[in-house]
Image (cartoon, rainbow, N blue to C red):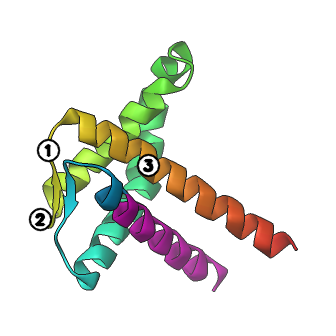
Amino acid sequence: MKLIGGLIFIVFSNAIALLAAAEFILGFTFTGGFIDLVIAAGVLTLANTLLRPILKLFFGPLIVLTFGFFAIAINAVILYILDILIDPLIIDGYIPLLWATLIIALVNFLINLSAKFLYKH
């Protein structure tokens, strides 16, 4: 049961992060409704859970050589794949893709940090 609750929390966190990126980044647009947002967040969660560890394993030396900056490129690739798979998500160029990657990572970090802080106390 704890696993399912954790997955639901991650999907919720990704949905908020996608909305934040769509709100603050020009060139990153999400035109779908609530169901589309949940599907997009679910696909992002699935890609982050399954695909990102494999990419980090293959590109580990590059991540080390670039002091972790290549991990941002891996996250951007996953977000680009999400753009291809989900129709309501539109990313117009590499600069909005990079900024959206950073915003999504920051929002997810803050949500997870606040959840750990609230759960601990």
Q: Which residue is mark 1?
A: 92
Question: 116 and 28: which one is in front?
Answer: 28
Residue at image position (61%, 57%) is 110
19 falls in the magenta region: yes
Which residue is outermost to the right? 121
Residue at image position (64%, 62%) is 112
118 with respect to 78 (left or right) = right
Which corner quadrant of the image does residue 73 belong to?
A: top left
The crowd level at tag 2 (other Cα within 10 Å; few <14, some 14-19, many 20+) is few
Residue at image position (17%, 64%) is 86
Cα–Cα span, label 3 and label 2: 21 Å
Which range of residues does the magenta coloring cover?
Answer: 1-20
Q: Position of residue 116 (x, y in %)?
A: 75, 65
Dot placed on the residue nearer the N-terminal end, 2 or 1: 2
Q: Which residue is mark 2?
A: 87
Q: Position of residue 7 (x, y in %)?
A: 52, 74
Q: Secondary structure at mark 2?
A: loop
Q: Main secondary structure of the magenta part?
A: helix
Q: Position of residue 29 (x, y in %)?
A: 20, 59
Q: Which residue is mark 3?
A: 103
The crowd level at tag 3 (other Cα within 10 Å; few <14, some 14-19, many 20+) is some
Q: Secondary structure at mark 3?
A: helix
Q: Position of residue 14 (x, y in %)?
A: 43, 65
Dot placed on the residue nearer the N-terminal end, 1 or 3: 1
Q: Do tag 3 and tag 2 residues touch (Cβ < 8 Å)?
A: no
Q: Is residue 2 above or below residue 76?
A: below
Q: Amino acid at mark 2?
A: Asp
Which corner quadrant of the image does residue 36 belong to?
A: bottom left
Residue at image position (46%, 57%) is 49
Q: Amino acid at mark 1?
A: Asp
Q: Quadrant of the N terminus?
A: bottom right
